[in-house]
Image (cartoon, rainbow, N blue to C red):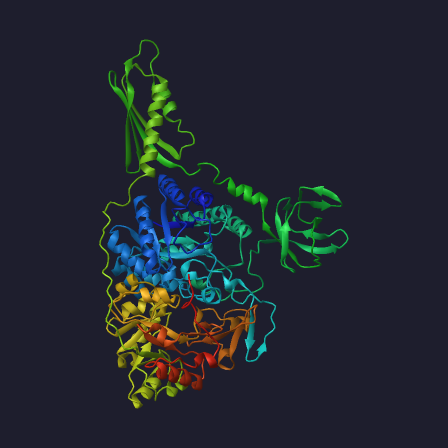
């Protein structure tokens, strides 16, 4: 059977130790710079070096996350950082930015690259693209189903990594701009503020819909532990646990549980996983779902977005004068535990437990207890969110060297020669000679049993002895001190060899891509309309390029363009799974058009025969990315003016100057969730009304849905940048839910001012934002 990998997160040293000691095969972690969890503790330079040494000593791999977007100005420091990672023998890098990928492949020929889930890889075609480019592994989108995963695994030589446990994003990873555009904390830059975990209200037409479940966008946690066999059989290489922001005890509980499940399936043993699931749930959970992988339609409950813990009782009463709450327990409760009262979403650590006015350190099922609590609460479940006893138990799984690496010893002692101890650990050897020569014993000789006893004393080292072979002359004498010294020095050398072993052997290259600048241009207008009314409205305007989405009325749009002697290009979705790629290829409209805008790597790879422009879905953020794709691109929506001006490219690129930014694109729909309590595809409710969500600041985010039942959550303001402020770029206008009059007005204004020094009147008529354009990072 192929090698399977259990991949664990580590936000700090203790979490890394917990993961290793509980059976992880590899660890992913971030340095203080350049990773997608900027708010985790992360590892400084010395800690990174220690992490590699500690992990390699246990034959565990270390993968470093550099999975965000980088501007040109950051690459000098970024390359210095990666040089250091290469030198300390990090096993692989996890990458999102195609520009960084480009540089790594040129500079470090034997550095493994794993393409992050932030790269939105969801199809065989996208996987094949990165296989051709030289990646070692891809991390698939969490939205891939088991059938899609199996198809990809069976048709690529790449290693396939899949998230199996932990927090889910409601949006496709790498495509979420919600935190970015409402708070300038970019998920693509490692600073996501998790707005999906906040409360929202659903609005239908002009009315707010009442709901008991206000956390409309907060998904449950993923748990696939009861399905690891299906994932193994599908061909998954790496089983990834989410949780670099989580505590060490959480990491220990989850790694331990999945280690049990994977090993049991491989060894064809049936085990009861309920105790492991209980421990994971007690450490942290938002309820569990098997996710898109296993077609779970109950992705969101919506009642609460934090740790739900485990229900341990119900509120019986509240005494205002004592400020105590009475609780009937259905689980044991210990002093030091933490609880949350579900009804009021407030909680506290348990400092005192009262039973009939007596203080106790613990109480059991069926007992009526009281605890101090300042807030009145009269009913509802009580949830334990911190279990002090379980925490102690889990700490005991990694407080010592429990994970032992097997080794064998061969001891040779010949009279008149130094004693020789050879230690073998897997393919690694250490040979150590004694400082003293072996002598003939005058009285008591050193026998096999005593030699075996002394060589076995390896104490708290991370080793366990498989066998000891002893080859000695008769009646030998060697001081015990010398034998012990021989063992210690040999073990020390083995530790040094294992923890500092090389995984890279190639010389770093000093060659970089030559970043070119293209000639100056006469600005051209690219317009994307989303419906036929918008398209009809712009037909008589001097627009250079018109694009229309791939959807059921694309051919009708093509006919309208033909009637007006306009050339139409096809705009392909940001989400293209393999079936959708095949559907596009087989469609009549695809055969008719020459020009397409591609928004993900599968389409980029599958439709090479067309004239391609790379859309914002690929997040082209620097000159190295532009140099890699060798095509015109609509540059990332998260770049400011200075970053845009720094781009060097041999192609004329575009900047989106107008559009209601798609903050999220998701296979999840809050509309059907509100009406049915689960995900009911093709319910058509969105066809009969307009929907939006309202945040806590009363900002309104319109919901658009497409023909694949995906939600597109638009920003509350339209992006607008004056075209004269980006004169070195072509301009791109993206229309979504605007009516035809607004569409025509905006296009007219842009066309009118493009060849003059005047400003448009757009800001006078529409509430807009300049997005990142004038923002200093």
In percent of the image, x 31 and y 90: which residue is there?
Answer: 563
**Front residue (pair 502, 142):** 502
Q: Position of residue 160 (x, y in %)?
A: 34, 57
Q: Position of residue 521 (x, y in %)?
A: 26, 75
Residue 533 shows in the view: yes
Quarter of the figure with residue 101:
bottom left
Residue 548 shows in the view: no
Above or below, 657 relative to 386: below
In percent of the image, x 34 and y 80: which residue is there?
Answer: 754
**Front residue (pair 703, 755):** 755
Q: Is residue 347 left or right of residue 457?
A: right
Q: How many marks?
A: 0
Q: Position of residue 522 (x, y in %)?
A: 27, 77
**Front residue (pair 157, 214):** 214
Toward the top, the furthest residue is 442
Above or below, 741 relative to 144: below
Above or below, 35 relative to 735: above
Q: Position of residue 225 (x, y in %)?
A: 46, 54
């Amino acid at each position: 059977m192929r090698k399977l990998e259990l991949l664990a997160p580590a936000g700090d040293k203790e979490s890394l130790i917990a993961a290793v000691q509980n059976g992880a095969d590899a660890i992913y972690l971030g340095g203080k710079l350049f990773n997608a969890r900027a708010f985790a503790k992360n590892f400084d330079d010395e800690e990174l070096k220690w992490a590699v040494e500690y992990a390699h000593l246990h034959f565990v791999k270390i993968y470093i996350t550099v999975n965000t977007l980088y501007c040109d100005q950051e690459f000098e420091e970024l390359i210095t950082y990666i040089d250091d990672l290469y030198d300390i023998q990090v096993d692989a890098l996890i990458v999102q930015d195609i520009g960084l990928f480009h540089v790594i492949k040129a500079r470090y020929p034997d550095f493994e690259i794993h393409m992050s889930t932030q790269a939105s890889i969801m199809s065989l075609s996208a996987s094949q693209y990165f296989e051709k480019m030289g990646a070692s592994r891809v991390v698939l989108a969490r939205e891939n189903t088991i059938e899609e995963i199996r198809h990809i695994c069976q048709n690529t030589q790449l290693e396939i990594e899949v998230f199996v446990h932990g927090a889910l994003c409601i949006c496709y990873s790498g495509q979420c701009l919600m935190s970015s555009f409402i708070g300038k904390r970019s998920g693509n830059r490692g600073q996501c503020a998790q707005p999906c975990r906040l409360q929202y209200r659903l609005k239908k037409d002009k009315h707010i819909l009442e709901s008991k479940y206000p956390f409309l966008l907060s998904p449950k946690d993923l748990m696939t532990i009861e399905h690891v066999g299906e994932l193994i059989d599908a061909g998954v290489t790496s089983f990834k646990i989410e949780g670099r922001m989580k505590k060490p005890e959480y990491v220990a509980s989850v790694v331990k549980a999945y280690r049990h499940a994977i090993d049991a399936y491989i060894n064809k043993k049936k085990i009861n996983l309920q105790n492991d699931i209980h421990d994971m749930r007690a450490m942290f959970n938002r309820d569990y779902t098997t996710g898109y992988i296993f077609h779970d339609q109950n992705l969101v409950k919506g009642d609460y977005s934090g740790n739900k813990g485990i229900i341990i009782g119900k509120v019986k009463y509240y005494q205002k004068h004592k400020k105590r709450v009475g609780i009937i327990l259905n689980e044991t409760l210990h002093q030091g535990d933490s609880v949350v009262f579900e009804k009021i979403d407030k909680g506290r650590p348990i400092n005192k437990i009262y039973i009939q006015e007596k203080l106790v350190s613990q109480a059991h099922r069926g007992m009526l207890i009281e605890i101090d609590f300042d807030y009145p609460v009269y009913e509802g479940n009580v949830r334990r969110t911190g279990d002090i006893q379980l925490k102690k138990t889990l700490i005991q799984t990694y407080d010592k060297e429990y994970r032992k690496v097997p080794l064998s010893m061969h001891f040779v002692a010949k009279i008149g020669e130094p004693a020789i101890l050879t230690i073998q650990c897997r393919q690694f050897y250490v040979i150590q000679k004694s400082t003293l020569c072996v002598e003939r014993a005058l009285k008591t000789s050193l026998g096999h049993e005593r030699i075996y006893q002394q060589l076995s004393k390896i104490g708290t080292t991370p080793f366990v002895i498989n066998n000891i072979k002893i080859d000695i002359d008769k009646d030998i004498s060697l001081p015990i001190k010398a034998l012990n010294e021989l063992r210690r020095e040999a073990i020390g050398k083995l530790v040094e060899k294992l923890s500092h072993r090389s995984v890279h052997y190639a010389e770093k290259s000093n060659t970089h891509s030559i970043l070119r600048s293209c000639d100056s241009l006469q600005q051209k207008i690219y317009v994307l309309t989303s419906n036929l009314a918008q398209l009809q409205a712009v037909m008589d305007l001097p627009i250079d390029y018109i694009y229309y989405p791939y959807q059921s009325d694309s051919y009708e749009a093509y006919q309208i363009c033909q009637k007006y002697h306009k050339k139409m290009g096809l705009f392909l979705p940001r989400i293209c799974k393999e079936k959708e790629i095949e559907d596009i290829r087989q469609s009549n409209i695809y055969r008719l058009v020459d020009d397409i805008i591609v928004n993900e790597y599968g389409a980029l790879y599958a439709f090479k025969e067309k004239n391609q422009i790379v859309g914002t879905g690929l997040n082209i953020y620097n000159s190295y990315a532009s140099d890699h794709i060798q095509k015109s691109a609509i540059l990332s929506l998260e770049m400011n003016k200075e970053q845009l001006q720094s781009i060097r490219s041999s192609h004329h690129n575009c900047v989106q100057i107008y559009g209601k930014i798609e903050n999220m694109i998701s296979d999840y729909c809050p509309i059907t969730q509100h009406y049915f309590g689960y995900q009911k595809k093709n319910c058509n409710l969105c066809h009969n009304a307009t929907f939006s969500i309202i945040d806590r600041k009363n900002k309104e985010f319109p919901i658009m849905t497409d023909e694949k039942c995906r939600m597109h959550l638009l920003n509350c303001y339209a992006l607008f940048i004056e075209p004269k402020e980006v004169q070195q770029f072509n301009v791109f206008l993206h229309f979504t839910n605007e009516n035809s009059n607004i569409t025509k007005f905006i296009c007219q204004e842009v066309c009118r001012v493009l060849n003059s020094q005047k400003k448009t009147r757009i800001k006078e008529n529409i509430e807009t934002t300049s997005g990142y354009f004038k923002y200093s990072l």
